[in-house]
Amino acid sequence: MAGQIPDLIAEARTGTGKGAARQARRDGFVPGVVYGGDADPLAIKIPFNVLLKKLKAGRFLSTLFNLKVEGEEDVRVICRGVQRDVVKDLPTHIDLLRLRRTSKISLFIHVDFINEEEAPGIKKGGVLTIVRPEVELNVTAGDIPESIVVDLAGMNVGDIVHISDVTLPDGAKPTVERDFVIANISAPSSLRSSDDGEEDAAEATEEAAAEE
């Protein structure tokens, strides 16, 4: 396990049912349940402001968390549902799934680019255009990579990096089947402007010839 799994801190919730859930909300918490993993369901509650901040940060449903509940062993979980108020669109309940180390999950993995100084295209003034700073991969919960690496050494202007050009960690595969683009090295803006000017001049010449 190379990446750092973020903590999700919760409290055990006493009582179940609508009454207990309403009380948790009145106390400033979002009630929830942790299930799966060959263990009994565990009723929990998470501070409303903490959960809302994580939801606004994005990718909550595809982030693996280390759930910490006092009196319980830490466990890896992934969110499998957030119920929201139909009027205010604020979280009212959360469902978390326990994961075994062998469980397969889909997560967004950061892309690192190395050896820019060894890319002839960049030395000539080319620009690295990153199309996907993260790639969604199906991975094993116990072996989640911190990142995938794109080596830019030897790349020239006009070269494109597809997902098929990247060495993925063992057991990991993209959730998208097509061979999508991760990045490319485009021409310097000055060169692009020059090329555009030449194309415009050529088109003008062709139009003039056609009129004659």
Image: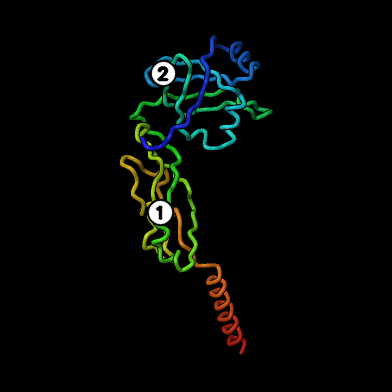
Crowding near pointer 1: few (<14 within 10 Å), some, many (20+)? few
Q: Residue furthest front?
A: 117
Determine which residue is flagged by label 2. Answer: 73
Residue 195 image position (x, y, % from top left): 53, 74
Determine which residue is flagged by label 1. Answer: 114
Residue 83 image position (x, y, % from top left): 58, 26
Q: Residue at x 45, y 16 (%)?
A: 41
Work out whether 108 lies above or below 150: above
Crowding near pointer 2: few (<14 within 10 Å), some, many (20+)? few
Q: Quadrant of the C terminus?
A: bottom right
Residue 2 image position (x, y, % from top left): 37, 37
Residue 36 image position (x, y, % from top left): 41, 21
Kind of residue indicated by mark 1: Ile
Query: Along the horizontal axis of the image, is 160 left or right of 9?
Result: left
Q: CA distance from mark 1 to mark 2?
A: 38 Å
Q: Residue at x 47, y 31 (%)?
A: 6
What SS does tag 2 mark?
loop
Kind of residue indicated by mark 2: Glu
The colour scheme of the drawn protein is: rainbow
Work out whether 123 lies above or below 30: below
Q: Residue furthest right?
A: 87
Q: Residue at x 45, y 56 (%)?
A: 183
Q: Residue at x 52, y 33 (%)?
A: 60
